[in-house]
Image (cartoon, helix red, strand yellow):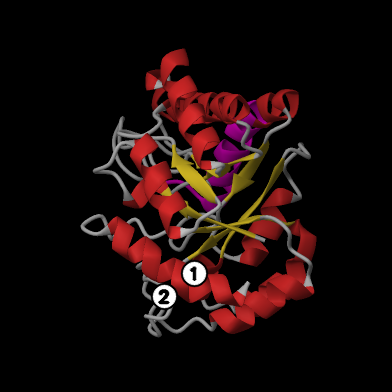
Amino acid sequence: MRLSFSSNAFRNHALEDVVGILKGIGYQGLEVMCDVPHAWPPDMTPERVRSLKAALKRARMGVSNLNAFMMCAVEDFHHPSWVEPDPAYRRKRVDHTIAALTLAKKLGAKTVSTEPGGHLPYGYTREQALGLFREGLREAAAHAEKLGVRLLIEPEPGMIVQSSEEFAAFIKTVESDAVGLNFDLGHFFCVGEDPVALIRKLGRKIEHVHLEDIAENREHFHLPPGRGAIDFRAVGRALKAVRYKGWITIELYPFQDDPAGVARQAFEAIRPLL
């Protein structure tokens, strides 16, 4: 298992500087935020791609994942979503995902994570929304297949796919082998599931892990490991039991005031358990 940290906590830093900071702490990789100010795909000119790749090469760091969840360059964390009623607005999410997949290929990343559809639009049934999500995924997944990059859905509290059971039911209807699961253990904890039991149940279906702590009340707010109720020692044992060999990305975007400090605290808490 290799440990990385998401750049979405470092929104006040240049991406190349983030590589150096994380390398100095001991991380082996970086999750790249496909949004402003880091790697919004339309801004990633050949020169920007070369600059980032050079920084990663100097640091001997890998790219754990491209996080294509947020679209603050257009609106916010969750909009435009896959289920926008306006087809033109919904198209922005599809195009963004396709561009993120293309960028992943250029950076040598194997996965791109995306939101689980979005929030249920007013006046729509859940099945109608899932149909829109499935329709958009079809084109993005075809592009992923051509590139050899995995497109991973990340269930999230409050969205149309938020639990492991909802994901399992939905993925059966997706007509592409290029789509898989981004396992955010805090999100599953928020909706009442046991992430340790889920790791043991899902095993090799887990293709990338997002890690953060969550308070005992299961409020969806990312906390540094050790400040919430998740048993990370048990998480580490479960990941070893299923022989997980992939990336674990710590995601602590609420802590932009001191991202380097919280990244170091998280590394010191998690590294001994893996």
What is the CA distance from the residue labelled 2 to the residue labelled 1?
6 Å
In this orientation, which residue lies closer to the viewer: 21 or 250? 21
Residue at 73%, 30% in the rendered image: 148
Magenta-drawn segment: 123-140
Question: In the rendered structure, are the residues bearing label 2 and label 1 in contact, judged by CB atoms less than 8 Å apart?
Answer: yes
User: Up-down: is 127 above or below 238?
Assistant: above
Q: Nearer the viewer, residue 243 or 113?
A: 243
Q: Secondary structure at mark 2?
A: loop
Quadrant in which the N terminus is drawn = bottom right
Mark 2 belongs to which amino acid? Ile
Query: Circle 1 sits on which residue?
Result: 186
Inspect the image, locate mark 1, and give the three-letter code of the amino acid beneath it: Gly
110 inside magenta stretch? no
Nearer the observer, 219 or 232: 232
Is residue 52 rendered to the left or right of residue 75?
Answer: right
- Which residue in the structure is indicated by mark 2? 214
Q: Which element type, helix, strand or loop, lies under badge 1?
A: helix
Q: Earlier in the sequence, mark 2 or mark 1?
A: 1
Query: Eyeballing the image, is 157 above or below 13?
Result: below
Residue, far top:
46
Q: Main secondary structure of the magenta part?
A: helix
Residue at (30% x, 57% y) in the render:
259
**Residue 254: horizontal and vertical position, in percent?**
29, 59
Q: Residue at x 30, y 34 (%)?
A: 37
Q: Residues within 10 Å of mark 2 (few under 14, many from 20)?
A: many
x and y percent of residue 217 in the render? 38, 83
> Looking at the picture, how far across and down is residue 167, in whole percent?
65, 57
Residue 136 on the magenta segment: yes
Residue 246: give its label: none
